[in-house]
Amino acid sequence: MFYRAATSVTLYPEFIVNPGTEFTGYIGPCNSGAAPYKTANGSDSIIKVVRNIKSARQYGFVHDAVINGLTVKGVFNIFSEGDYSVRIYDAGSGRYLSILPVKLTAGINNINIPLQPEWGKYLRIALFKSDMLVHYTDFEKN
């Protein structure tokens, strides 16, 4: 499912994206199709969407993804310390590209994750506890 709006898309706290579904918001002219709208400088105007699986909220969430060249700093707000894995997912290929086992403490944790040049432009940082998806956020690689 996708939504397109001329100047902004606002998602209120009641907005729900169910597990197994996708939501993408685009800024661009209404009725202009599903392709991302290009701004005057040529960049895509795609809204960053975060998703959280209800039963996993006790563990924490991905707070941010900060891109610096071929490194993304994943910022995680963890409620329950322990062993996790951070996975990078490629939206274009539909597969996980990297799995990084990490030990996270309660509070804010910063993890630098290397990206490969051949990976797609639209990626996701996914936080897992064992094999359970806790939370993820999508980002755009430079």
Image (cartoon, helix red, strand yellow):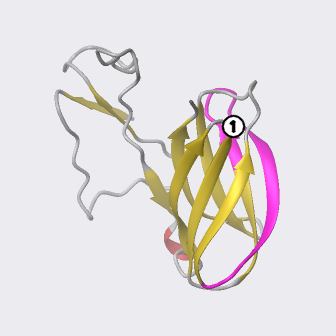
Q: Which residues are magenta?
A: 88-106
In this picture, is 19 found above or below 4? below
Position above or below: 34 against 9:
above
Location of the C terminus by quadrant is top right
Location of residue 76 in the rendering, given as x and y in whole percent from the top left corner: 58, 68
| Residue 20 in sight here | no
Quadrant where the image shows the N terminus: top left
Quadrant in the rendering for residue 60: bottom right
**Side of 12 where 100 appears, left or right:** right
Q: Quadrant of residue 13?
A: bottom left
Q: Can residue 118 be seen? A: yes
- Residue at 61% across / 57% down in the picture? 74
In the picture shown, does residue 103 fall above or below 27? below
- Whether 49 is among the magenta residues is no
Front residue of 132 and 72: 72
Relative image position of residue 85 (x, y in whole percent): 76, 64
Counting from the top left corner in percent of width and height, residue 99 is at 81, 53
Q: Position of residue 103 (x, y in %)?
A: 77, 76
Residue drawn 26% across the image and 52% down it: 11
Outermost residue toward the front? 68
Amino acid of disc 1? Leu
In the rendered structure, does residue 91 fall within the stretch colored magenta? yes
Residue drawn 68% across the image and 44% down it:
71
| Secondary element at tag 1 | loop
Q: Which residue corresponds to mark 1?
A: 70
Q: Residue at x 78, y 69 (%)?
A: 102
Q: Residues within 10 Å of mark 1 (few under 14, many from 20)?
A: few
Specify the principal SS of the magenta part: strand
